Image: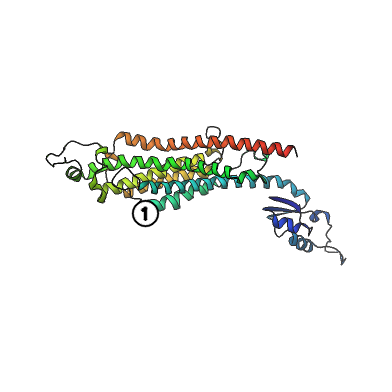
Amino acid sequence: MLSVGLSHLPGNLEIFSRADIAIGVDVLAEEVSFPDATNTDGNALYPDEVAFVTSISAHSSVFNLWGSSSTCHILDIIRIGRASLEAVTSAFSFVFSGCLSFSMFVLLSSCTASTAVPTTPVLGSFLYTQIILLGIGLSMAYTDGEKDSMTRVPPKNDTTKYSFRENKRMYVGGVLRAAPSAVIPQLLYLIVLGELMWAFDAPFVEEYCLATDNMAQIVSAKPSWTSIIRCEALRDYSGPAKVSAGAITLASLAICTCVVSASFVFRTEPLFREPPWKRNHLWVGSMLLSFVLIAVYLAATLERGSMTSLPWYFHLLFVLTPFICLWLSEVVKKADQKHEKRVAMMRRLQFETR
């Protein structure tokens, strides 16, 4: 709730203290004639006295405007406040979605189709949760406000905004936007593990995974990754192929999350209508820095020759999956946009008919 009032009236003290944001206006600064140095009138008010009186009532105010002419800045304060609230809400939604994606990613690791459960690297997890996710989320909080933000009626005292139906829609939308970034890297893990097992530990695969039931013949040709990932001997395997596969999978999750962040910069506006880099250059810098950190992490943790050992269709999927996640996020956001537009029209109708 926003409260604007005269700061020299003691009756506004309680109103200012209950408001979320209070703006006090000190009109005495212009209406009271202060004495000069030659005036010896003991009943005259001094600037320090007026400032002391107004500070008693306005100590709960975020802003205390000096003089009635300063009220022209109230619209700018409200506009910046709305833009900040919208940007912080979008940033929180992105961080929540990223954390939910990581939680689902770890949970799905135990449900993998491979007998070798993916390992989640500690260094990669720290890089994702503490640097990339928070860095992009912090940069999103500096998004400039929309030009028509002051023409919309804010959701003040809107009880439907916190109803069970509204919360259910928000939670379901959050899960749908977070799920693709967690599921698709798990599918890529199966390809990576099977291909790297043959590239780094071909004797192990030939001895334990490709032998027939009677151990009479061993297949010498390069097998498909689908025939390797279900090998029982991989349950206790902890070689370089599994370590590199886990690092590539986590990097795929991080890249998908970075690309999907473009859908969270504007909470309801689609990407084709207004690209996010037009009103938030800091977000672009955080994205580029995140990609550099991911590349450095892969270069430091992967076994030499890991990426070149993977087939061409994996590289194609590795590049396309972030944009698939972004498209799915935009589909969910389009449904939210229709809902928010309908609710905003209802609020405006109720405001104009009061």
Q: Quadrant of residue 320?
A: top left
**Colouring convention used in this rendered image of the protein:** rainbow
**Count of labels in the image:** 1
Q: Is residue 24 above or below residue 312?
A: below
| Residue 143 in sight | no
| Residue 183, percent from left and from top | 40, 41
Q: Is residue 211 left or right of residue 110?
A: left
> Where does label 1 land, which residue?
122
| Residue 97 in sight | yes
| Residue 25, percent from left and from top | 75, 53
| Residue 5, percent from left and from top | 76, 52
Depth check: 174 or 139 in front?
174
Name the quarter where the C terminus is drawn: top right
Depth check: 69 or 222 in front?
222
Q: Is residue 39 left or right of residue 167?
A: right
> What type is the residue that disc 1 sits on?
Val
Q: Is residue 187 left or right of residue 8?
A: left
| Residue 319, percent from left and from top | 38, 36
Callout 1: helix, strand or loop?
helix
Q: Quadrant of residue 258?
A: top left
Q: Residue at x 37, y 42 (%)?
A: 185
Q: Is residue 56 above or below residue 112?
A: below
Label 1 neighbour load within 10 Å: few <14, some 14-19, many 20+: few
Depth check: 157 or 79 in front?
157
Q: Name the residue furthest left.
A: 216
